[in-house]
Amino acid sequence: MTAPRKLRLRGKGRDSYLELVLAFPLASIESDEHLTESQEVMDRLLGSVRLDDGEKMYLDALSDLVASYEDEHHQIAPASDADMLRHLMETRGITQAELSRQAGLAKSSIFEVLTGEKPFSRQMIRKLADYFHVDVSVLTTNL
């Protein structure tokens, strides 16, 4: 979300906002086709070198409409513990052996989580959160 702007537009900002609304009205998204069209409009705006206040305000409103539709119709399931751990390890560029040594975790526990045999334990979550410098809530979505 961007910083709040004045709600009243004047001059060029007002003109650009109204032009965008006339070209592609701001309305609740009702279908995947409408979603695709909205994303194309957003992509065009985001591809601009510089947006004036009217274009920014329009983009913010359209982004909110897209987010609302996606939240309702295209929910993303939380990542599994294995996927989360794999991602954190890849981001840090470390192996299972390095993680075991540096975070003080048993190699077998890391292996079992990565293969999906076992979920994170509470102790493992604390150690991983400390090691990767993330909030524990990042690792507890599947508890």
Image (cartoon, helix red, strand yellow):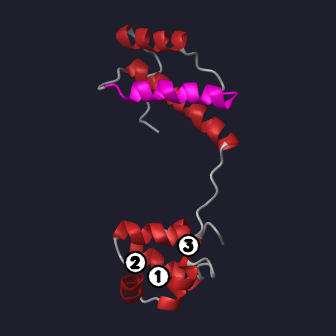
> Mark 2: which secondary structure?
helix
The amino acid pointed to by label 1 is Lys
Foreground tag (3 vs 1): 3
User: Residue visible at 66% across and 25% down?
Assistant: 28
Q: Which residue is mark 3?
A: 82
Quick one: 83 or 15, which is closer to the camera? 83
User: Residue visible at 69% across and 41% down?
Assistant: 72
Q: Residue furthest front?
A: 115
Q: State the count of labels.
A: 3
The amino acid pointed to by label 3 is Ala
Asked if marks 2 and 1 touch (Cβ < 8 Å), the reply is: yes
Part of the protein shown in magenta: 29-48
Magenta span: predominant SS is helix
Q: Is residue 93 something one can see in this rendering?
A: yes
Residue 94 location, x and y as percent?
35, 76
Q: Which residue is mark 2?
A: 131
Q: What crowding class fits label 2: few (fewer than 14 Cα within 10 Å), some (14-19), or many (20 or more)?
A: few
Q: Separation of disc 3 and disc 2 at Cα?
A: 17 Å
User: Residue visible at 46% across and 14% down?
Assistant: 17
The amino acid pointed to by label 2 is Tyr
Q: Separation of disc 2 and disc 1 at Cα?
A: 6 Å
Q: Separation of disc 3 and disc 1 at Cα?
A: 16 Å
Q: Which residue is mark 1?
A: 127
Q: What crowding class fits label 3: few (fewer than 14 Cα within 10 Å), some (14-19), or many (20 or more)?
A: many
